[in-house]
Image (cartoon, grey):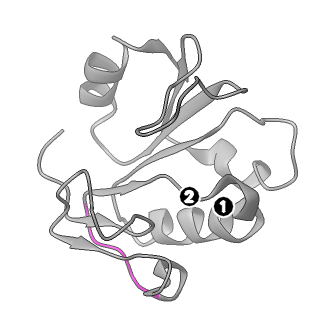
Amino acid sequence: MGPLACDPCTTEHNHLNAQVFYTEKDDGLTKDWKSLTYCNPPYSKMKLWAPKIKQQAEKDVEIIALVKNATGTRWFESLWGADAICFVSGRLRFVGAENSAPFESLVLYFGRRKATFRDIFGEIGRVL
């Protein structure tokens, strides 16, 4: 969908080469994000990250967020406002992991380019 402007929760290795990135030490929760932002928050801290994702989306930041498929949780409630959701087929294997994740994943999109998101992410799952 284009070069990433921001990755607010990554490691210093910054695998996605975002122009601006924040590690745990930088605390991306305390920063404003820039479009286009990719966010793969720590799933154990989604009660903090879900409201931040929603807040930044309301500031017209275009966001692609990879999250655990946990649509019945309280933290997910605010994320139902995503402009598009990709239900990833199968379970992802994260970089450096020996096995696939023990849960399903979603890719949430907040922004105006829904058709572009659908075209790209439709290759890895069903997009609503």
Which residue is nearer to you in this view: 21 or 55?
Answer: 21
Q: Residues within 10 Å of mark 1 (few under 14, many from 20)?
A: many
Under circle 2, the secondary element is loop
- Residue for point 34% across, 32% down: 114
**Magenta stretch, residue numbers:** 31-35
The answer to whether residue 13 is left or right of residue 126 is left
Please provide percent x and percent y for residue 102. 72, 26
Dominant SS in magenta: loop
Per the rendering, the mark at residue 78 is none
Q: Is residue 29 magenta?
A: no
- Residue for point 58% across, 71% down: 52
- Residue for point 42% across, 72% down: 59
Dot 2 amino acid type: Pro
Please provide percent x and percent y for residue 90. 58, 11
The answer to whether residue 40 is left or right of residue 17 is right
Q: Is residue 77 above or below residue 9?
A: above
Dot 1 amino acid type: Ala
- In which quadrant will I find the N terminus? top left
Q: Is residue 40 above or below residue 1?
A: below
Query: Which residue is denoted by mark 1 in the rendering?
Result: 50
Q: Quadrant of residue 13?
A: bottom left
The answer to whether residue 104 is left or right of residue 17 is right
Under circle 1, the secondary element is helix
- Residue for point 66% across, 61% down: 50
Mark 1 or mark 2, whichever is nearer to me: 2
Query: Which residue is denoted by mark 2 in the rendering?
Result: 41
Which residue is nearer to you in this view: 11 or 88?
Answer: 11
Please provide percent x and percent y for residue 87. 57, 20
Q: Residues within 10 Å of mark 2 (few under 14, many from 20)?
A: many
Please provide percent x and percent y for residue 43. 68, 53
Q: CA distance from mark 1 to mark 2?
A: 9 Å
Residue lying farthest to the front in this orientation: 98
